[in-house]
Amino acid sequence: MEKYTYSLCDRKGYNVLRIESAFTNLSYGEYCDKYIVPLLPILSASHDERVLLDEKTSYLALIDEPEIG
């Protein structure tokens, strides 16, 4: 299972929001398409400015899964 971080910014490059995924079996792109992309129009409307995925600062979070038991 993987965990991803997505950074969203405005057109000027200012950070608007950082989203950390739950642990998932989806790939980075699959998770983005399913959960992040649908949020972009809503966030854009609430900020009166287009909100974009900042691919330079979005990344795979290299976090060890907690051991169970």
Image (cartoon, grey):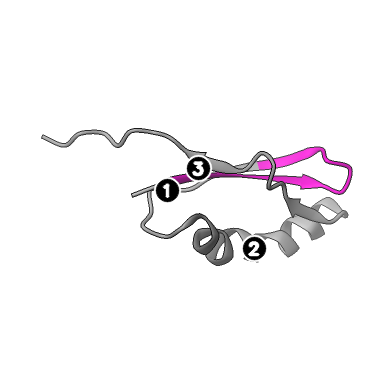
Q: Earlier in the sequence, mark 2 or mark 3?
A: 2
Q: Residue at x 26, y 33 (%)?
A: 66
Membership of 32 in magenta stretch: no
Determine crowd level at label 1: few under 14, some 14-19, many 20+ residues with C-alpha closer than 10 A. Answer: few
Which residue type carries mark 2? Val
Q: Is residue 34 left or right of residue 2?
A: right
In this rendering, the answer to whether 49 lies above or below 14 is below
Membership of 5 in magenta stretch: yes
Q: Are marks 2 and 3 in contact (CB under 8 Å)?
A: no
Name the residue carrying label 1.
22
In this rendering, the answer to whether 45 lies above or below 16 is below
Q: Which mark is residue 37?
A: 2
Which residue type carries mark 3? Leu
Give the magenta part as a residue range. Answer: 3-17
Q: Residue at x 20, y 34 (%)?
A: 67
Q: Secondary structure at mark 2?
A: helix
Q: Secondary structure at mark 1?
A: loop
Q: Is residue 29 left or right of residue 56?
A: left
Which residue type carries mark 1? Ala
Name the residue carrying label 3.
60
- Residue 30 in picture, x, y percent from top left: 51, 64
Quadrant occupied by the C terminus: top left
- Residue 38 in picture, x, y percent from top left: 64, 66
Tell me the quarter of the picture where residue 44 sits.
Answer: bottom right
Q: Are marks 3 and 1 in contact (CB under 8 Å)?
A: no
Q: Secondary structure at mark 3?
A: strand
Distance CA(mark 1)–CA(mark 2) = 16 Å
Q: Which mark is residue 67?
A: none
Determine crowd level at label 2: few under 14, some 14-19, many 20+ residues with C-alpha closer than 10 A. Answer: few
